[in-house]
Image: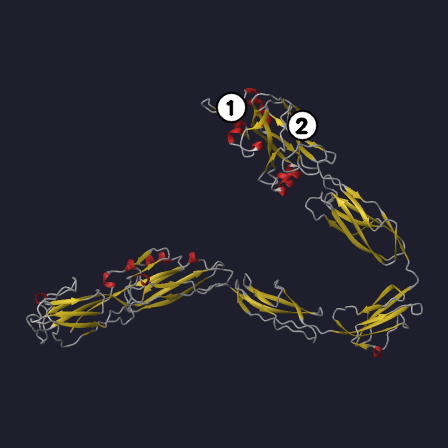
């Protein structure tokens, strides 16, 4: 069908409305009076933007654009119809990409809910400019129908037609059109709305398919009651006018979707049975708009079995007492057809053997001597001469399994602990335990459980074996208060001027009641007489450095689960930790930190005692020679620290002075520092001494000399504390250990 919605003029009686068809489907409809024109510039509606909203169903409305499948530019008054859902039986406007608005919606599930519950519908047209080219209206834009047209050639709202700002300037995409067109278009094609009422409950309908009406079956036949219902919340079956079985609820969220009903019944009386199904469109008969639908009544004739059948009588007998445990009868067994009779399952019993005969009686119990051991079934064939058969099964009572619980007798509240039934066992040789059921809810052989509060609790274990036999046992557990256990853990180099990690993280608490670290309290104090002093500090995890100088500073440590401690003086420091968990319960512990001394390095210099001048003058080999002495530093840190710097000096006893003890006196001599120039430069007599060191921390140096006499080498060895081993903010220069030594 060719469709169009021109909008070059309005129609006073046009409005958005709801139409319905004979099948009670709904559609959005509007009527427009088009006025065709041969002017070069025209405008036509190419589609509609609809919004469906119901905040009680969803805070998010459903919005959809419905493009027309074609645009007819001829005139006339027309009605345009857009079905809300599929199934519309009347004529409707062509929709590009579907047969209903629902076909174009992405979230169909939400759309269906909103439509069903009733909603507010908003509509705005999509209007495209056209030009008459060679006498034909042509859409303005790159693509047909304006799908990807430039924004200045179509309108989705009133302001896209035209609006005037506060300065009186006109804006919009259709300002060149007539005032009549613009006013009519804005009033007739935008901001349309209506209220869509909630869908009324559909009347239910049910059809009974089985059993077939007026059919005949033999007594004892099981027949199927089967039917289908539409618009039903649930369906129930009625036999001889009385409700039978259970109601079956529609599995579909939408009751308009047909549901199937099926159940079975055994017809054990010789008579005529009547069958009917009934379906209701609401959960309760008292609900609004509730309607009950009833199917046609079917009749089934039940007749007695033909005389060429008999009965098989089955008896189960106790193996130990030869007394009857249970009896049953299989009626109407056809003649001349072998029938295998298997041993019935009896709880707490196992089959021992069986026997069959055609000459017994209903009351008779045969001697156990006729039992066929380990035979668990019998095959019998009824006939005219043997119209009945008697089958006997002997059973022996089974031994129950033994349930055993392994669990602690005392635990803390909130702590998980293991309960185990692994030692439970079967006393019947051929049985195995199939399931474990605990009063705590556990359903396996073992697992972890916990109790939130202190007290005495009894847990029960029930085991079931492969024969279906059970046994239960109990175990009492005393649940203690959930107190935490404080723990102070130390790590790092425990000596002067080194950061020592003090942590409470190794503290223990029941699983359910974690430690509240914000309530943690610390106190650190020196133990007088051990060398320890108040000259210490800490660094918190957030980088805050605190110099502890009084008791008031201790409060800054509260709420910490871990921090760094550093003391300037060796000795014993007492640490007190208090923790609290979420129960709440608390614990306090005292510990000590023995801070060791930071030992200075030990300096050892080695060099020849006597050295000769054996190197030629680099300028004149006939002149005085010079000597070279290799001096080795074998210094070390007795407590494993790093020697980070070495400062080398040299003095020459030029006047050969001696002190009061008879040793060379260098006090009036000046220090000779490391030679800083190019060592390849000539070493001449006027230079006298050259101290060669590759870098200031080198452990092997050379002394070049011209003058005969005594020389003294001085070495200052200074330790290095890595940044990751100390709180550098607390260090002062005197904290760096150094040793000054002279030699050679």
Q: Which residue is mark 2?
A: 79
Mark drawn on residue 367: none
Using the image, determine if residue 635 lies above or below residue 44. below
**In the rendered structure, are the residues bearing label 1 and label 2 in contact, judged by CB atoms less than 8 Å apart?**
no
Q: Nearer the viewer, residue 430 or 495?
A: 430
Q: Quadrant of residue 32?
A: top right
Q: Is residue 530 left or right of residue 313?
A: left
Give whichever of discs 1 and 2 has the lower sequence position: 2
Res. 539 visible in picture: yes
Counting from the top left corner in percent of width and height, residue 627 is at 13, 72
- Give the crowd class for mark 2: few <14, some 14-19, many >=20 residues within 10 Å: some
Q: Secondary structure at mark 2?
A: strand
Counting the numbered discs, the total is 2
Q: Quadrant of residue 354?
A: bottom right
Using the image, determine if residue 551 lies above or below residue 145. below
Counting from the top left corner in percent of width and height, residue 86 is at 68, 38
Q: Quadrant of the N terminus?
A: top right
Spatial separation of the CA atoms under disc 1 and disc 2: 28 Å
Residue drawn 21% across the image and 64% down it: 696
Q: Which residue is mark 1?
A: 175
Res. 114 visible in picture: no
Q: Nearer the viewer, residue 5 or 241?
A: 5
């Amino acid at each position: 069908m060719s469709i169009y919605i021109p909008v070059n003029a309005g129609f006073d009686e046009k409005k958005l409305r709801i139409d319905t068809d004979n099948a009670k489907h709904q559609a959005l409809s509007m009527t427009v009076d088009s006025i065709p024109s041969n002017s070069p510039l025209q405008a036509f509606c190419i589609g509609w933007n609809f919004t469906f909203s119901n905040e009680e169903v969803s805070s998010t409305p459903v919005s959809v654009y419905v493009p027309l499948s074609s645009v007819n530019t001829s005139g006339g008054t027309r009605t345009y119809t857009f079905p809300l859902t599929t199934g519309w039986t009347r004529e409707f406007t062509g929709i590009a990409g579907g047969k209903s608005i629902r076909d174009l919606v992405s979230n169909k599930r939400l759309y269906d809910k909103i439509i069903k519950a009733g909603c507010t519908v908003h509509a705005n047209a999509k209007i495209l400019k056209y030009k008459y080219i060679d006498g034909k209206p042509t859409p303005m834009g790159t693509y047909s129908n304006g799908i990807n047209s430039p924004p200045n050639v179509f309108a989705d709202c009133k302001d896209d037609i035209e609006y005037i700002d506060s300065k009186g300037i006109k804006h919009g995409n259709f300002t060149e059109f007539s005032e009549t067109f613009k006013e009519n278009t804005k009033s007739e094609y935008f901001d349309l709305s209506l209220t869509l009422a909630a869908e009324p409950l559909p009347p239910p309908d049910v059809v009974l398919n089985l059993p077939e009406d007026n059919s005949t079956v033999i007594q004892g036949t099981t027949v199927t009651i089967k039917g289908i219902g539409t618009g039903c919340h649930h369906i129930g079956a009625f036999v001889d006018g009385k409700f039978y079985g259970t109601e079956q609820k529609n599995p579909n969220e939408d009751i308009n979707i047909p549901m199937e009903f099926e159940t079975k019944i055994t017809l054990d009386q010789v008579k005529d049975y009547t069958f009917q199904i009934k379906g209701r469109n609401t959960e309760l008969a008292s609900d609004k708009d509730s309607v009950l639908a009833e199917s046609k009544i079917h009749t089934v004739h039940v007749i007695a079995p033909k005389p060429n059948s008999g009965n098989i009588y089955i008896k189960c007998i106790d193996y130990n007492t030869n007394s009857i445990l249970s009896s049953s009868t299989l009626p109407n067994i056809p003649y001349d057809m072998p029938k295998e009779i298997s041993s019935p399952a009896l709880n707490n019993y196992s089959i021992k053997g069986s026997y069959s005969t055609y000459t017994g009686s209903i009351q008779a119990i045969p001697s156990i001597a006729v039992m066929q051991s380990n035979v668990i079934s019998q095959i019998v064939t009824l006939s005219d001469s043997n119209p009945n058969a008697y089958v006997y099964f002997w059973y022996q009572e089974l031994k129950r399994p033994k349930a055993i619980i392994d669990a602690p007798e005392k635990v803390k509240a909130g702590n998980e602990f293991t309960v185990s039934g692994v030692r439970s066992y079967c006393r019947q040789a051929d049985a195995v335990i199939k399931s474990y059921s605990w009063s705590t809810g556990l359903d396996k052989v073992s697992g972890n459980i916990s109790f939130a509060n202190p007290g005495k609790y009894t847990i029960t274990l029930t085991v079931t074996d492969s024969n279906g036999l059970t046994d239960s046992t109990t175990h009492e557990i005393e649940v203690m208060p959930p107190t935490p256990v404080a723990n102070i853990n130390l790590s790092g180099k425990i000596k002067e001027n080194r950061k020592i990690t003090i942590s409470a993280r190794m503290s223990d608490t029941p699983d359910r009641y974690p430690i509240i670290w914000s309530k943690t309290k610390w106190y650190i104090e020196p133990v007088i007489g051990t060398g320890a002093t108040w000259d210490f500090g800490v660094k918190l995890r957030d980088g805050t450095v605190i110099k502890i100088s009084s008791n008031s500073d201790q409060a800054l440590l509260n709420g910490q689960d871990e921090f760094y401690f550093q003391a300037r003086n060796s000795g014993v420091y007492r640490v007190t930790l208090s923790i609290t968990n979420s129960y709440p319960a608390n614990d306090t512990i005292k510990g000590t930190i023995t801070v060791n001394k930071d030992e200075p390095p030990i300096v050892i210099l080695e060099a020849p005692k006597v050295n000769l001048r054996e190197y030629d003058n680099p300028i004149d080999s006939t002149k005085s020679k010079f000597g070279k002495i290799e001096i080795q530093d074998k210094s070390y840190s007795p407590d494993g620290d790093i020697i980070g710097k070495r400062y080398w000096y040299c003095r020459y006893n030029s006047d050969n002075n001696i002190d009061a003890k008879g040793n060379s006196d260098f006090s009036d001599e000046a220090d000779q520092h490391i030679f800083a120039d190019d060592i390849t430069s000539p070493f001449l007599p006027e230079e006298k001494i050259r101290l060669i060191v590759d870098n200031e921390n080198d452990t092997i140096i050379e002394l070049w000399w011209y003058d005969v006499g005594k020389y003294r080498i001085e070495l200052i060895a200074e330790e290095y504390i890595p940044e990751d081993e100390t709180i550098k903010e607390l260090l002062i220069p005197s904290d760096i250990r150094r040793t000054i030594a002279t030699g050679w």
